[in-house]
Image (tube, rainbow, N blue to C red):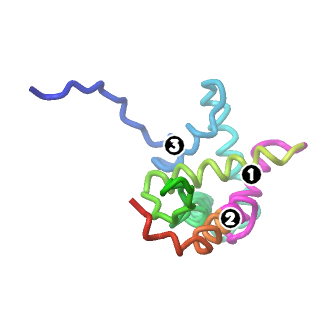
Amino acid sequence: MGRITASRKQLKPDPKFDSLLASKFINCLMNDGKKTVAQAIFYNALDEIQTRLPDVEPLEVFTTAVENVKPQIEVRSKRVGGAAYQVPMQVNKNRQQSLAFRWILIALREKKGRPTHLKLADELVAAYNKEGAAITRRENIHRMADANKAFAHFAW
């Protein structure tokens, strides 16, 4: 007998750029089911990026920023003989993307006192230039993994 699975709705690309990545990011940015508000924030941020970097396509800035923030390796706790070790492990593609989105959103939500679309534009431009809070978080994760590579043999 086959296993019965619930059908999931297919993610549709965003209406302006026809990009699945942008659509996923908008869904992560969304609060309380207010998708139109999240879309407005995202598109206004890309418009702001267009004015700051006129020679680069804003969607390209967004995709490059997400690629720059994606972690290649992370540490996970592993208990061996009563001791917990921080074991460096590869990060799969889905987790890389979700961590990148999460870190960008955490970085912009930590900043206060400005409209969200401006904070998002700041963070995306910073990540595009390989700087900013999200990139710092990624570098810290990589540094921790590098420091604990002696425990790599515990990877499961």
Mark 2 Cα-neighbour bin, 10 Å: few <14, some 14–19, many ≥20? many
Of residues 135 and 31, the one nearer the viewer is 135
Query: x%, y% of residue 3?
Result: 18, 28
Q: Which mark's residue is nearer the viewer, 2 or 3?
A: 2
Query: x%, y% of residue 68?
Result: 59, 67
Alpha carbon of mark 3 to alpha carbon of mark 1: how far? 20 Å
Residue type highlighted by circle 2: Ile
Alpha carbon of mark 2 to alpha carbon of mark 1: how far? 10 Å
Q: Going by the picture, which residue comes out furthest to the right? A: 113
Location of the N terminus by quadrant is top left
Label 2: which secondary element: helix
Left or right of 109, for residue 32 = left
Which span of residues is magenta-colored?
113-137
| Residue positioned 44% across, 51% down in the render | 94
Q: Magenta span: helix, strand or loop, mainly?
A: helix
- The residue singled out by tag 2 in the image is 135
Mark 1 and mark 3 in contact (Cβ < 8 Å)?
no
